[in-house]
Image (cartoon, helix red, strand yellow):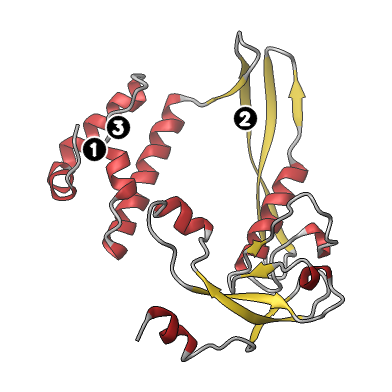
Amino acid sequence: MTEKNKIKSKIKVGDMAGIACPICLTELVIREFAHASTLEEHVFAPNDLPSLKPMCGCSKKTCKAHMDDLLWLHSGDCFRNHRNVDYGFIRNNDGAIPSIQRSINATQMEEERLQKKLNLYFVQFQTEWVCEANEMGKVTSRKFKKISIILRERNGHYVYYIPGIESLLYDIRSFIQALERYKDDENTYWLLESFKKAINRKWNYRLFHWWIWKYYSELAEEIGAKR
């Protein structure tokens, strides 16, 4: 039995999806099956064929989502051809209701809304916030994180100023997350990235590279990493 038939034996086209359209609140129905890529699959396995998933659409014929063939995954991810069309999404959020993606969208939009900038030409100061939202898209918490410093380069472009210690801690956290992911599904992509020698030779990158090869050299050999 093929992968598509295995899925269809449990879920069929026309079944109710258990999530609602973020335009008219009509419950979505399964329209088709497709190898649609989620953000996680795109980031962690960019070269792999995405898994087969049911795609859900709005059943209300007068809804813009139905007329323009907008589709959603059960996770709430929206697939549409026209990004610049105003469909009238509730709270301007295209994530299905309720869904993880709707929560993610609401979080990002609130963090951007709270963000403030002070531009002094050669340097910018920018407030950063951490927010949380539920699967209905309602923001449940807002916490101030830090003030970021953004420097203006000679070519007129702005770049974030990241202290060396902050960058070092970030690399260590990213490596630990990649290691946990490797233990779960044997995905080596991000581990191999961690073992690569950084082009930037500042002290924090050199320290991280020394630490990872000194204490995880056996792991590097196991996954085929090179200096």
Please say if the residues under marks 1 and 3 sit with CB atoms less than 8 Å apart. yes
Q: Between marks 1 and 3, how big is the CA–CA gap?
A: 6 Å
Question: Marks 2/1: CA distance?
Answer: 28 Å
Horizontal relation, residue 58 to residue 41: left or right: right
Quarter of the image where one finds residue 125: top right
Q: Is residue 190 above or below residue 14?
A: above
Q: Which residue is mark 1?
A: 212
Relative image position of residue 186 (x, y in whole percent): 26, 60
Please say if the residues under marks 2 and 3 sit with CB atoms less than 8 Å apart: no
Residue at 74 percent across and 54 percent down: it is: 82
Who is closer to the viewer here, 176 or 197?
Answer: 197
Q: Quadrant of the N terminus?
A: bottom left
- Above or below residue 163? Residue 15 is below
Which numbered disc covers residue 208?
3
Residue named by callout 2 = 148
SS type, badge 3: helix
- The first of marks 2 and 1 along the sequence is 2
Tell me the amino acid under the disc marked 3: Phe
* Crowd class of label 1 (few under 14; some 14 to 19; many from 20; radius 10 Å): some
Where residue 57 sits in the image (x, y, percent)? 69, 75
Q: Nearer the viewer, residue 68 or 156?
A: 68
- Which image quarter is the C terminus in? top left
Query: Does residue 94 appear left or right of residue 34 in this picture?
Result: right
Kind of residue sitting beneath label 1: Ile
